[in-house]
Amino acid sequence: MRWNYLFPVAGIFICLLEIGYPFFIWNDKTRKIWLICICGMHFAIGVTMGMYLFALIMIILNIAAFGPGLVADSAKQLFVHRQASHA
């Protein structure tokens, strides 16, 4: 398997992810997937480049800024689903 194309494709993907961040993170429909992608990107940066502190801080800041609404919505949906199944 040839890895020559991995880094250019990954670089383009990261550029598109970062450029689309301000547009898609504010949209409720795309926020969850975009937050997962951004956290995954920072995790990969931490693992591959050894920038653990940077990755951890960026993941924490992204989850603190955009994660609470997602957790509350998921918990609310779970609670409603449980009530409906017991009724």
Image: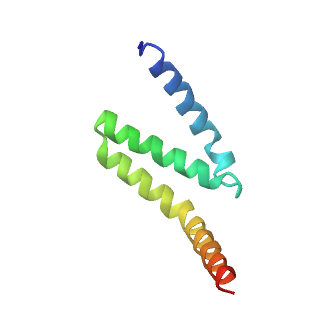
Q: Please give the count of numbered marks on the rendered protein.
A: 0
The x, y position of residue 1, in whole percent, is 41, 14
Above or below, 3 against 41 in this view is: above
Residue at the (64%, 54%) spot, across then down: 31
Q: Does residue 45 appear to the left or right of 12 in the view shown?
A: left
The quarter in which the C terminus is drawn is bottom right
The x, y position of residue 57, in whole percent, is 38, 53
Please state which of residues 22 and 86 is positioned toward the viewer in this rendering: 86
The quadrant holding residue 7 is: top left
Above or below, 26 against 83 in this view is: above
Above or below, 29 against 5 in this view is: below
Residue at the (64%, 40%) spot, across then down: 20
The quadrant holding residue 82 is: bottom right
Above or below, 64 against 9 in this view is: below
Q: Does residue 45 appear to the left or right of 87 in the view shown?
A: left
Residue at the (34%, 41%) spot, across then down: 46
